[in-house]
Image: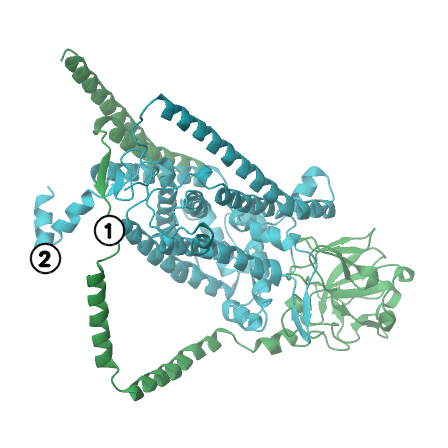
Chain colours: A green, B cyan
Amino acid sequence: MADEKPLADQEERRQNLGMVLTMLAFAVSIAGAVGFLYVYWTNHDNGLMGASAAVALAGMGVGLVVWTHFLMRHEEAAAERPVLPSSPELREAFVQDFVAGQDQIGRRQVLGWATTGTLVVLGAGGLSLLRSLFGASPETVLKAPVWRRGDRLVTPEGRPVSVETLEPGSTITVFPEGRVGFVPGQTVLIRVQADLLRLPPERRQWAPQGNVAFSRLCTHAGCPVALYEATRHLLLCPCHQSTFNVLTGAQPTSGPAARALPQLPLYVDAHNHLRAAGDFTEPPGPGFWSLPS
Amino acid sequence: MINRPARWLDRRLGIAGFARRGLDHIFPDHWSFMLGEIAMASFAVLVMTGVYLAMFFNSSSAEVTYHGPYKALDGVKMSAAYFSTLNLSFSVPAGLLIRQIHHWAALVFIGAVLAHLFRVFFTAAYRSPREINWVIGVTLLVLAMAAGFVGYSLPDDLLSGTGLRIAYSIVLSIPIVGPRLAFVIFGGPVPSAVMIPRMYGLHVFVLPGLIVLLLGVHLAIVWRQTHTNYPGPGRSNRRIVGSRLWPTYSMKILGLFCLVFAALAALGGLVQANPIWIYGPYDPAAALPGAQPDWYLGWAEGALRLFPAFNLRIGHYLVPEVFFPGILFPLLLFGGLYLYPFVEPWFTHDRDEHHILSLPYEQPKRTALASAGIMMLLVLLLAGSGDVLAVLMHGSVIAIRTLFQIVFFAAPVLTAAVAYWLCWRVQRRRGREHARAAAAGPVPSDGGEGN
């Protein structure tokens, strides 16, 4: 009995402390909100706006938590959990009613067939809307020719490239003339010392004076193969770090890519300009199911 | 104050009984139940900030020329989508703040969903009768990651364009239907003129709509089945212990929401997220060395980098390299997650209803499996920045990749072994404590699953 009064005093003190702390937190929140208003209406500084909004919200949050902790009774509440499965009788009754309804719907089998037929045709109509989501057939787009024999190689600025434009060891991006920026047409032109090349026999004529050209789209996931390491004659894809050896016809040497970069056969015209002697050896870019082997 | 509106509503809906029972609904007090709530709070912030952003964002790929306060891009040609994101970041008061809060909220949302999933896994909360909610929860994780990726793709900057290209290449790699599916989703080879509107439709209607729907069902099922409890006095399969919805839990959840929002506001204001003006507009001929996706897709990026240069020729047909790490691996991973609650009973022969959680040390095999899974994802996440690590450590990209390929197999096995051993040790210690306590005399029941 003697303990009761001090306990009540303690509780009283605790409640008072809780109230003071809650008010303090809310005051901080107001200060934060005022700060936010000031910054928003004056200079829009992103950091100050975020910080003041954070102070306003945190003050509110801390206030609510302190309130709950100090001012509300702590009691562990308990309750019965519901029994989830229904009684077998109830389930049985449901099944019976459902089946009775089903019987009413489906006494004639021919109607069932008619419904299925109607739904199939209706579904086909609905699904065919998907066709509008892609323009041309993927098969045609993915295998569409990119370079035509005789296309001049031009720089992104549209200037033709001569057989002497590049010094050995250097590289530029080229496009088919008239189609600068055409994504599948982006091609990397590299000049190497002609005697270093070890191209397959049928490609020997494709690299006049050491100028070799490959599709610039990685065969792995389609990123531009944008980096060239001249000392090791490697093209490197920055996305997943596949490397391709220029000397052997851009065969992959490391990393996740398994296919060589498609090569563009080149020849030199009467004005010493580089032109395509045909299309890429394969459709450029990442692989797909019906990619010709 | 509540009297009049309550009477008005109840005369029309007759819900006083239901609402009264609702006030007494019990929510357990353990901190680990907060993970799902943090996810919910960040989702609420995502919706609010997302609606605000949608008022300013233009999903068009039409080419425009930038003139505005950000001088570094003055006169540069770009898509209207990128233009509107620049405007939002530099010209709309508080636009950048809201954009960055939105981005941070997405990062935190997915992190909280994942942490919640691990909590549920480690404590075996997915067991009967909660398998449906496990399946819904895993679906929510997939939807959250998809929504995050698609949102990241909208500004049409160099990073987002690169991400879309890779996503397109992965869809394209699916046998038979890949090209068709990729064209349906992206409207043709990336970059296509319609891909930003497509992603926008997915990001503001389809994915959030599905998330809201499934989140509603998730919560309704939790409400119907009641929460689980950790083992403890008074808790059993029949009784739940915790705080009542009214007033304790309501106060706590409001407080938590404010605190999560405060943290996101602080991050959005003070920590830069996705500075698209540094990357520049998407240029299909450009690539950004050191580019990485947001953290929650790091595992997929790592898988793409680590998988060896292998593809499959079947007659005239090709299964490209990215199919295996980009499609097959995630299918196995998420397929395993989906099926786990249905497969585990084959081994444990335990199909009973459970409302009391199992502590991680009580099931060493399950804990070892989950720890190995987490370790595998961490290794992939690190491998996803292998090129950055190579630069930092002055190592070669090839050496680091080979190292990661070995660690990918070794680290999970090692982790599983250590986790198993730790569980076993805790079990043994608990066993001794129990024996000592039993020798000392009768003890109050510690709950357990007894009815």
Disc 1 and disc 2: Cα gap in Å? 30 Å
Q: Which residue is mark 1?
A: A83
| SS category of the residue bearing label 1 | loop
Q: Amino acid at mark 1?
A: Val
**Left or right: B90 in relation to B442:** right
**Left or right: B200 in relation to B128:** right
| SS category of the residue bearing label 2 | helix
A245 or B117: nearer the eye? B117
Q: Position of residue B68 (x, y in %)?
A: 50, 51
Q: Amino acid at mark 2?
A: Arg
**What residue lies at 33% left-to-right and 50% top-to-bottom?**
B353
Q: Residue furthest bottom?
A: A110
User: Chain under label 1?
Assistant: A
Please, is residue A253 above or below residue A71 in the view? Answer: below
Q: Which residue is mark 2?
A: B12
B304 or A154: nearer the eye? B304
Q: How many marks?
A: 2
**What residue lies at 52% left-to-right and 67% top-to-bottom?**
B186
Q: Position of residue B41 (x, y in %)?
A: 35, 44
Please, is residue A60 above or below residue B9 in the view? Answer: above
